[in-house]
Amino acid sequence: MDEIQGSTLSEEIHRLQAEHRRYAQRLEELIQKPYLSEDEQLEEVRLKKLKLHAKDLIFALEHRSPAAPAIA
């Protein structure tokens, strides 16, 4: 059972890392522009929040105690 949870946990961490990279890549594209439209400015703020949230989740999952019960 722990192996399955460990595998699922690892898959979730990899998924979040990929998500984080996508957000960072799109942010880099926006940063390269000399000017941002209002929509792009809102997207930039949204992406920064999503990127930070993904990073926080990755950290929490990586530092999760193996003895802690899984929350369903």
Image: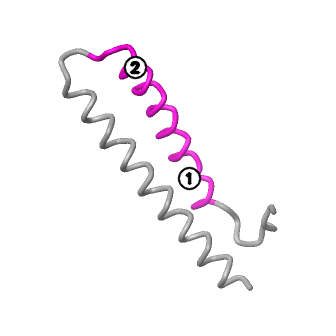
Relative to 30, is 51 on the left or the right?
right
Image quarter where the C terminus lies is bottom right
- Image quadrant where residue 39 sits: top left
Residue name at image x 45 percent, y 32 percent: 48
Residue name at image x 62 percent, y 53 percent: 60
Q: Earlier in the sequence, mark 1 or mark 2?
A: 2
- In the picture of the structure, the residue carrying the numbered disc 2 is 39
Q: Tell me the distance, in whole angstroms, between the alpha carbons under discs 1 and 2.
A: 30 Å
Task: Point out residue 58 in the picture as x, y percentages from the top left corner.
Answer: 54, 54
Magenta: predominant secondary structure element?
helix
Q: Is residue 3 above or below residue 21?
A: below
Task: Point out residue 70 in the picture as x, y percentages from the top left corner.
Answer: 78, 66
Residue name at image x 63 percent, y 77 percent: 6
Query: Is the residue marked by circle 1 packed among few (<14), some (14-19), or many (20+) residues within 10 Å?
Result: few
Relative to 72, is 21 on the left or the right?
left
Q: Nearer the viewer, residue 17 or 44?
A: 44
Q: Residues in magenta?
A: 36-63
| Element carrying mark 2 | helix
- In the picture of the structure, the residue carrying the numbered disc 1 is 59
Relative to 8, is 67 on the left or the right?
right
Q: Is residue 39 above or below residue 55?
A: above
Task: Point out residue 27 in the picture as x, y percentages from the top left corner.
Answer: 33, 34
Q: Is residue 63 above or below residue 51?
A: below
Residue name at image x 71 percent, y 82 percent: 2
Question: Which amino acid lies under the numbered mark 2 shown in the image of this protein?
Answer: Asp
Question: Which amino acid lies under the numbered mark 1 shown in the image of this protein?
Answer: Phe
Q: What number of labels is visible?
A: 2
Image quarter where the N terminus lies is bottom right
Q: Nearer the viewer, residue 37 or 17?
A: 37
